[in-house]
Amino acid sequence: MDLPELAAFLKSRRARVRPADVGLPAGPRRRVPGLRREEAAQLAGLSADYYTELERGRGAQPSVQVLAALARALRLRGDERDHLFHLAGRPVPPTSHGPAAHVQPALLGLLDRLTTTPAQVITDLHETLAQNALAVALIGRQPLTPGPSASYAYRWFTDPAARALYPVDDHPHQSRAFVSDLRAVAARRGHDARVRSMVAELRRHSEEFAALWDDHEVALRRRDHKRLVHPALGVIELDCHSLFSEDGRQRLLWFTAQPGSRDADRLELLSVIGTQDMTAEEGFPREASHRTGPAAP
């Protein structure tokens, strides 16, 4: 681990990212060429104090998940991402999938330009790789956890708190959609050890999943109508669209509302609320100054 070089590299990459590239206003009093430290921390789901320690080379030893979040927040290219892991003394993770996966450049480029609608990039196993500010405001910052629990589909069947994002009446539909999508992904991947392991774990832990899996329904989740529960705005009805990468391993999701509807007005209000702490409910966005790590969905 080379902490001085890691600190210098983070500072140089932060200076390169323009606020507009990540959907942030430039502001009239900005005195740095790129992002402020607290902005980089917020984008990576870290506390400002922890990020500052990293840039000062004060002994913080970031995990693989934290490094992956920093690589996405600072828009690092493939070689730069690998360099970041080398400086931190961590093994470079595979780029194809998983919570530490490198976001495919085409999808990240589109995400950077979606500044007026909630959007995020996920893997085909529903592991969140990157979110814009409005997605964080809408559904909360997704956790950077290792193992199967990085997948929202996995947490849906194993953690009751994960279902708070949807009204109870919609849970059966979401369960069927997750299972049919996962079955389609399993077929696409062939004899993939990660998929087999996830399915086996879910069958052991969830009778609901096991019953739905045995129904053999198959359907990739390309488009869906959702009702999402926001702690300040209530239930928002949205259409969720998916754009798949060429290899099908990653997806860009974005949310839209019917023009002129109450839900469109609520999406507009999200841009005003931003990531302010509008409620004490855990699992929804908080100001970066109060965040010690990424919130659960």
Image (spheres, grey):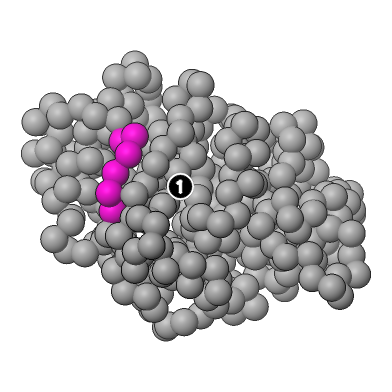
In percent of width and height, residue 1 lies at: 80, 47
Q: Position of residue 159 (x, y in %)?
A: 28, 58
| Region of the chain picked out in magenta, as a range | 221-226
Q: Which residue is mark 1?
A: 254
Residue 18 in the image, given as x and y percentages of width and height? 79, 54
Quarter of the view holding residue 26? bottom right
Left-right relation of 143 to 48: left
Position of 91 with respect to 1 (left or right) is: left
Relative to 168, is 225 on the left or the right? Answer: right
Looking at this view, name the residue that lies furthest to the top: 190
Res. 166 image quadrant = bottom left
Q: Amino acid at mark 1?
A: Trp
Asked if residue 94 can be seen in this view, the reply is: yes
In the picture, the quarter occupied by the C terminus is bottom left
| Depth order, front residue of 82/42 | 42
Position in image of residue 80 (x %, y %):
78, 37
Query: Mark 1 falls on what kind of element?
Result: strand
x 45%, y 47%: residue: 254
Please tell me which residue is depicted at 54% across the width and 68% down the height of the picture.
271
Q: Residues within 10 Å of mark 1 (few under 14, many from 20)?
A: many
* Residue at 28% over, 25% down: 184
- Determine which quarter of the picture holds residue 20: bottom right
The answer to whether 230 is drawn above or below residue 133 in the figure is below
- 224 falls in the magenta region: yes
- Magenta stretch: residue 33 in it? no
